Image (cartoon, rainbow, N blue to C red):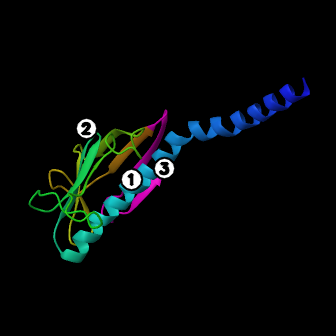
Amino acid sequence: MIELLIVIVILAISAAIVVPMASSAGGMQLRAAVNMVAADLEYAKSMSISRGQRYSVMFDADAETYQIVDEDGNTISHPVKKGFPYAVNFQSDSRLDRVDIASVDFGGTSTVGFDYLGSPYDGSGAPLNSGIVTLRANGVTRTVNVEPVTGFISISD
């Protein structure tokens, strides 16, 4: 009887450790996705500044994807994954498959571009008034903001 109680206690302790870890997987993916989107926006902005031409990030909330394109609309090559386009698909990436692009709003468009000074523009080429990308996982949302004029990128809950 004592052995049975010891086994039950050990199982209860194990369950108490495993259950929070399993439920926080979506939260961890959400944090990773938000940081990745912010970093990719910063990358497009820095490419625009360093190369003196416009680069844009095009989001497709329905397909759960985004890509970085040059001023001609061509997807650029990924700087780390040589030979691959710089495109991110949340659904096909097992590290991010619990994350959804809830909404994208860059002045009524789903594209944000940066000029040679790093200033943001919406998909129609007008100066950006506000820019927001909202990601969701397990009922929790986080937002990536792009500030007008400066292009400052921040993350909020």
Vertical placement of 115 versus 90: above or below? below
Question: Which quarter of the figure is the N terminus placed in?
Answer: top right
Query: Is residue 17 or residue 157 the one in the foreground?
Result: 17
Where is mark 3, residue-wise? Answer: 31
Q: Secondary structure at mark 2?
A: loop
Vertical placement of 49 versus 19: above or below? below
Crowd class of label 3 (few under 14; some 14 to 19; many from 20; radius 10 Å):
some
Marks 3/1: CA–CA distance: 15 Å
For the point 17% across and 65% down, the residue is: 54
Query: Is residue 152 or residue 35 the one in the foreground?
Result: 35
Where is mark 2, residue-wise? Answer: 63
For the point 25% across and 63% down, the residue is: 78
- Write down the quadrant of residue 92 in the picture: top left
Vertical placement of 64 versus 129: above or below? above
Going from the N terminus, do you reach mark 2 or mark 1 first? 2
Going from the N terminus, do you reach mark 3 or mark 2 first? 3
Residue contact between numbered discs 3 and 1, judged by CB atoms under 8 Å:
no
Q: Amino acid at mark 3?
A: Arg
Q: Secondary structure at mark 1?
A: strand
Where is mark 1, residue-wise? Answer: 145
Q: Bounds of the magenta span? A: 137-157
Crowd class of label 2 (few under 14; some 14 to 19; many from 20; radius 10 Å):
few
Marks 3/2: CA–CA distance: 20 Å
Q: Amino acid at mark 2?
A: Ala
Query: Is residue 58 or residue 87 the one in the foreground?
Result: 87
